């Protein structure tokens, strides 16, 4: 929906959305209609709704993939509620919140005396989910040992409690979720390929909020109404400039981040309208946006690259016609500088490390004027102090490598 600078954003859109949600709850509706408890009007979310409604009546395993905060648990719950198992139990387990031993006991139960602290028999989550559904959130966090047991439950529907030899059978529908690319996890040896294919019968990809900006306005109005009622505030509309900034933010924390920002604005703001001054600093342009971060062993390089390009495009503005120089050129210059530094500013080593010939490196040094004010002296052509080399500076001509 385009933003009209002459009007404020009020509850009318939310009313229409609520009506659509009520219609979505009716039987015999179109598969692309909404889901109970899930807001979304964008084409990407309509695809999610369609797949969810088509897979819900089946017994198939579902793998929900999406960044943290995109609402994976809401989709898992919708799958259960729309399935023939809706009258059975719905059990949720966050696999990333427990250690291996605790998670094994949590999932499969244990018998008295099986380990220190096991003072009684305990029923596991799979048993508790018999005739219903179990949602395994952050399934990528499970250990290889647990992945073997999960694979057996998926294939045979049976397992043993920790410390027990008696096999138990369960009839449980498994819905799993991950915020990682499991194919990358397989390549790195952290996830079993056979388990992946058992879980990934029907994949559902939840797009990040920045890829479905049409959903930002109804989400903002929904949370505005919720937190207005909870905090007894009359704030029911959004100033056009505030809505513009909300729509243009990249939301690395996705819907959860938006929810928190709206709640903050309701609590700290005053009056009937959400104004720009009530938004957090990063939406007012007073603090740089944070890049997307992933749990575990550091940031994912691919995601950082996506975020870097996105921020570069935004900083350049809609009329820029030098995006390649602004983004690629800046990254290339930084790469050459850092590699030169690690190679003691010896060009032949740096060129080999970069995978380019010395002539190309020489041209890049001149183009980016890298060594004009370089600390510790200019780059050298030789292999280092006391080693062969002509000792020329970076701006001297180099022979071809050929």
Image (cartoon, rainbow, N blue to C red):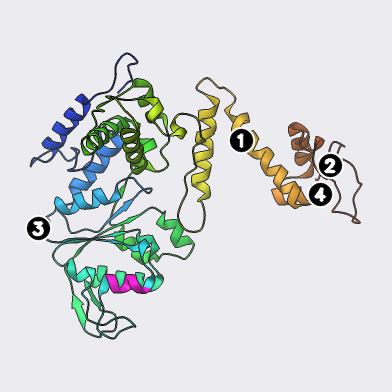
- Counting other residues with Cα less than 10 Å from the Cα at mark 2, is it few (<14), some (14-19), or many (20 or more)? many
Q: Residue at coordinates 26% horizontally, 43% vertically from top-left?
A: 48
Q: Nearer the viewer, mark 1 or mark 3?
A: 3
Real-space CA distance between mark 4 and mark 2, rounded to the nearest whole angstrom: 9 Å
- Measured as percent of width and height from the top left, residue 392 is found at 90, 42
Q: Earlier in the sequence, mark 3 or mark 4?
A: 3
Q: Are marks 2 and 1 in contact (CB under 8 Å)?
A: no
Real-space CA distance between mark 1 and mark 4, rounded to the nearest whole angstrom: 24 Å
Q: Earlier in the sequence, mark 4 or mark 2?
A: 4
Q: Earlier in the sequence, mark 1 or mark 3?
A: 3
Q: The C terminus is located in which quarter?
A: top right
Whether 103 is among the magenta residues is yes
Judged from the image, the secondary structure of the residue bearing numbered disc 3 is: loop
Left or right: residue 138 compared with residue 190: left
Judged from the image, the secondary structure of the residue bearing numbered disc 1 is: helix
> Which residue is denoted by mark 4 in the rendering?
346
Indicate which disc residue 328 carries: 1
- Measured as percent of width and height from the top left, residue 248 is found at 41, 29
Real-space CA distance between mark 3 and mark 4, rounded to the nearest whole angstrom: 70 Å
Q: Which segment did they paint magenta?
A: 101-106
Real-space CA distance between mark 1 and mark 3, rounded to the nearest whole angstrom: 55 Å
Q: Nearer the viewer, mark 4 or mark 2?
A: 2
Judged from the image, the secondary structure of the residue bearing numbered disc 4 is: loop
Whether 237 is among the magenta residues is no
Q: The N terminus is located in which quarter?
A: top left
Q: Are marks 1 and 3 in contact (CB under 8 Å)?
A: no
- Counting other residues with Cα less than 10 Å from the Cα at mark 3, is it few (<14), some (14-19), or many (20 or more)? few
> Which residue is denoted by mark 2 in the rendering?
378
Q: Is residue 4 above or below residue 194?
A: above
Q: Are marks 3 and 4 in contact (CB under 8 Å)?
A: no
Would you say the magenta stretch is mainly helix, strand or loop?
A: helix
Residue 102 in view, yes or no: yes
């Amino acid at each position: 929906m385009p933003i009209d600078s002459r009007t404020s954003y009020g509850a009318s859109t939310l009313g229409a959305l609520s009506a659509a949600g009520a219609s979505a709850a009716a039987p015999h509706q179109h598969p692309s209609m909404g889901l109970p408890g899930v807001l979304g009007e964008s084409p990407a979310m309509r695809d999610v709704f369609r797949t969810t409604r088509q897979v819900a009546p089946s017994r198939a395993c579902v793998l929900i993939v999406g960044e943290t905060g995109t609402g994976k648990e809401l989709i898992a719950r919708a799958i259960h509620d729309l399935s023939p198992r809706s009258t059975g139990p719905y059990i949720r387990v966050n696999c990333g919140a427990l250690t291996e031993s605790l998670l094994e006991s949590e999932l499969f139960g244990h018998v008295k005396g099986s380990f220190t602290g096991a003072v009684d028999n305990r029923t596991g989550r799979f048993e508790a989910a018999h005739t219903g559904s179990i949602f395994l959130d952050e399934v990528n966090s499970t250990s290889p040992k647990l992945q073997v047991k999960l694979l057996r439950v998926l294939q045979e529907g049976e397992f043993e409690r920790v410390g027990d030899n008696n096999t138990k059978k369960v009839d449980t529908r498994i819905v799993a979720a991950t915020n990682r690319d499991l194919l990358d996890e397989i390549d790195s040896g952290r996830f079993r390929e056979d388990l992946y294919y058992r879980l990934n019968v029907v994949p559902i990809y939840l797009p990040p909020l920045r890829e479905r900006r049409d959903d930002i306005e109804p989400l903002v109005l929904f949370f505005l109404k919720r937190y207005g009622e909870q905090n007894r505030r009359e704030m029911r509309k959004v100033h056009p400039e505030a809505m513009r900034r909300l729509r243009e933010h990249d939301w690395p924390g996705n819907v959860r981040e938006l929810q928190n920002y709206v709640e903050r604005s309701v609590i700290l703001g005053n009056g009937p309208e959400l104004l720009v001054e009530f938004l957090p600093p990063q939406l007012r342009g007073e603090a740089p946006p944070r890049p997307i971060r992933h749990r575990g062993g550091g940031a994912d390089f691919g995601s950082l690259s996506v975020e870097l390009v996105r921020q570069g495009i935004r900083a350049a503005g809609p009329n820029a016609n030098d995006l390649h120089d602004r983004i690629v050129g800046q990254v290339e210059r930084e790469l050459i500088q850092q590699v030169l530094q690690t190679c003691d500013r010896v060009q032949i080593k740096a060129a080999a490390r970069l995978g380019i010939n010395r002539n190309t490196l020489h041209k890049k040094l001149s183009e980016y004027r890298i060594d004009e004010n370089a600390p510790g002296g200019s780059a050298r052509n030789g292999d280092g102090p006391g080693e062969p080399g002509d000792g020329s500076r970076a701006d001297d001509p180099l022979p071809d490598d050929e």
